[in-house]
Amino acid sequence: MIKSQEYRSKALECLESAPWICDRSAKKALINMALCWLRLADMHDANRDPAEESDHVAAMRLAGLS
């Protein structure tokens, strides 16, 4: 799994856990943590070397689909 997918997976874990948390501040912290993971994933994608991309991802990017 590439880093950005790992980061997005962590964000999803935070968001899936949030509904089970009763403490409002802890729930808010999980949601904020998810947002941080998503920003990190976006930053990683923005700074990736295009040579690292798979042909499929590169084709989607060229087509403006990603």
Image: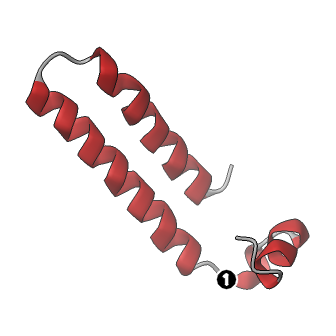
Please report the residue visible at 87 percent of the width from the left and 76 percent of the height from the top: 59
Q: How many marks?
A: 1
Task: Please determine whether, in this image, residue 65 is positioned above or below residue 23.
Answer: below
**Of helix, strand and loop, which one carries label 1?**
loop
Q: Is residue 64 or residue 4 the one in the foreground?
A: 64
Q: Is residue 16 or residue 5 the one in the foreground?
A: 16
Please report the residue visible at 48 percent of the width from the left and 37 percent of the height from the top: 12
Please report the residue visible at 26 percent of the width from the left and 36 percent of the height from the top: 30
Q: Percent x, y for residue 36? A: 33, 56
Q: Residues within 10 Å of mark 1 (few under 14, many from 20)?
A: few
Task: Please determine whether, in this image, residue 4 is positioned above or below residue 63.
Answer: above
Q: Percent x, y for residue 39? A: 40, 63
Q: Which quadrant holds the C terminus?
A: bottom right
> Is 35 displayed left or right of 43 in the figure?
left
Please state which amino acid type lies under the numbered disc 1: Asp
Task: Please determine whether, in this image, residue 61 is positioned above or below residue 38.
Answer: below
Task: Please determine whether, in this image, residue 31 is positioned above or below residue 16.
Answer: below
Which quadrant of the structure image shows residue 25? top left
Q: Percent x, y for residue 64? A: 75, 80
Please report the residue visible at 52 percent of the width from the left and 70 percent of the height from the top: 44
Q: Is residue 63 or residue 1 the one in the foreground?
A: 63
> Is 2 displayed left or right of 31 in the figure?
right
> Is 64 displayed left or right of 55 in the figure?
left
Q: Percent x, y for residue 52? A: 75, 75
Residue that label 1 marks: 49
Which quadrant of the structure image shows residue 51? bottom right
